[in-house]
Amino acid sequence: MRTHVLLLLALLAGAVGGAPEKSQRGTAGRLRTKREIPTGVALRNTVGSIYKRSQDATKASVTKSDQLLSIGDHDFTMRPNFGGPAVPVGVDVQVESLDTISEVDMDFTMTLYLRHYWKDRRLSFHSSTNQSMTFDGRLVKKIWVPDLFFVHSKRSFTHDTTTDNVMLRVFPDGKVLYSLRVTVTSMCSMDLSCFPLDTQTCSLEIESYAYTDDDLMLYWKEGNESLNTDDRISLSQFLIQEFRTSSKLAFYSSTGWYNRLYINFTLRRHIFFFLLQTYFPATLMVMLSWVSFWIDRRAVPARVPLGITTVLTMSTIITGVNASMPRVSYIKAVDIYLWVSFVFVFLSVIEYAAVNYLSTRQERRERRVREQDARERELREQLPCTCEAPRPGAPTGGYGEAAGRYGEAAGRFGLMASLGNGMKQRETVLLQLAMERDQLSGQVTDQVTGHVTSGGYDSTWVDTHVIDSYARVLFPGSYVLFNIIYWSIYS
């Protein structure tokens, strides 16, 4: 567009410059001839000058990166010093964020800047100022770079917003800095036997995929100082205690030995969340189950629903905790606490069942004793009284004096015999009734001596309130002792 404007201005300048000639020459033909000749020359000269200026202004002498780094003169499918000693590759890491820790999947997600340092003389170039050159990810595909990967990683990707987050910096002597921003999800084997009072140690492992330690020597560039973290890194459930680095050799039976770098970090779980969501509700349910010990044993509609409610609530708490945990084959610390609490709640229900059973049995026995007493009174009323019985053989007035004396003697003898038989029969009946009553009440009467002794049912005469009284002390005391032992072991 600018060129067209300049051409139009040149034409206008030529037209204006030809006007004086037209007035000086005199004839129209000569003026037209004289105007055409200088106008064409001026136009040609003007366009040539404009073209030359545009080239000088817009085009500079720029050397391509391929030519500067002599990329076309070398085979970058082979590592530096191919056939010679192993190429040293230093690594340092800047941890940007530690995103999630999952107990169910047993993994963690981390975002980091991974930087590689090595020397490749094939990329050396001449520089009078000894300054490095920085390139983006497009040049990475044309040169050799270390083939590092994350061992035990599940997912990983390089960020590409707004462009690929890759940087390549080359120094005149051939030293290379290769940096990229990566998010990786890696496995973390957790021991949950002390959950939620546990401390976990996870590691991110870096290793070369193809080159053994004979070809590539992988190391931390500055030891433990090679790992840097952001001070703002924090997790909702964990406290990050430390980050540290380590390295060792890893052996594969089919390929050989490889250098492996480790990023180790230790996490301690925050307990306050689980105190509010698990431990406090479980403790309150156990204490609520103790309320039934102070309720009258005859109040069945009050004590039974209370026990069932606490049992169901404990079952819900246990199910909710296990739903958010992996299905491990060992017992966790939270399982011990919840199941012991569940046993305490269940035993409070069993305690009332025992109290109710003994109370019912005692009341039934007392009712039978009362019925037997009523029966004994009825029998006593029905037995004949011999105190007013007529004397057999009394004189009727038709006998003589001798007969009267004989009859009087016989009458006295018959009266004594009759009284003796009646008293013996009455004592026998009363003794049998007493024996039946004593058996119902838990005592036995000696048939010979009549002494009352303890029988086989003596233990049933325990007041069932005593069981509740013992439970009021034993249950809280046992639960407090359990808590002391539990927290002293796991805290």
Image (cartoon, rainbow, N blue to C red):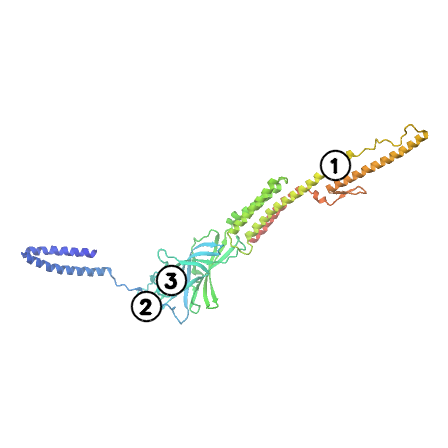
Name the residue tied to disc 3. Answer: 178
Give the Cα distance between marks 2 and 3.
Answer: 20 Å
Of pointers 1 and 3, the one earlier in the residue sequence: 3
Please name the residue that numbered disc 1 is placed on: 375
**Depth check, front residue: 328 or 99:** 328
CA gap between label 2 and label 1 equals 124 Å
Q: Main secondary structure of the magenta part?
A: helix
Judge whether residue 65 can be spotted in this image.
Answer: yes
Q: As drawn, is 19 to the left or to the right of 436?
A: left
Q: Quick one: which residue is furthest to the front in this view?
A: 398
Task: Tell me the tag on residue 72.
Answer: 2
Residue flagged by tag 2: what amino acid is it?
A: Gly
Mark nearest the camera among 2 and 1 is: 1
Q: Position of residue 85 (x, y in %)?
A: 41, 71
Q: Residue at x 83, y 36 (%)?
A: 422
The image shows residue 89 at horizontal and vertical percentages of 41, 65
Which class describes the residues within 10 Å of circle 3: few (<14), some (14-19), or many (20+)?
many
Quadrant in which the N terminus is drawn: bottom left
SS of the residue under disc 3: strand
Q: Are the residues tagged 2 and 1 within 8 Å (C-beta)?
A: no
Q: Is residue 441 above or below residue 116?
A: above
User: Which three-letter amino acid code belongs to the residue tagged 3?
Assistant: Tyr
Q: What span is colored magenta in the figure?
A: 371-376
Q: Secondary structure at mark 1?
A: helix
For marks 1 and 3, give the CA distance. 108 Å
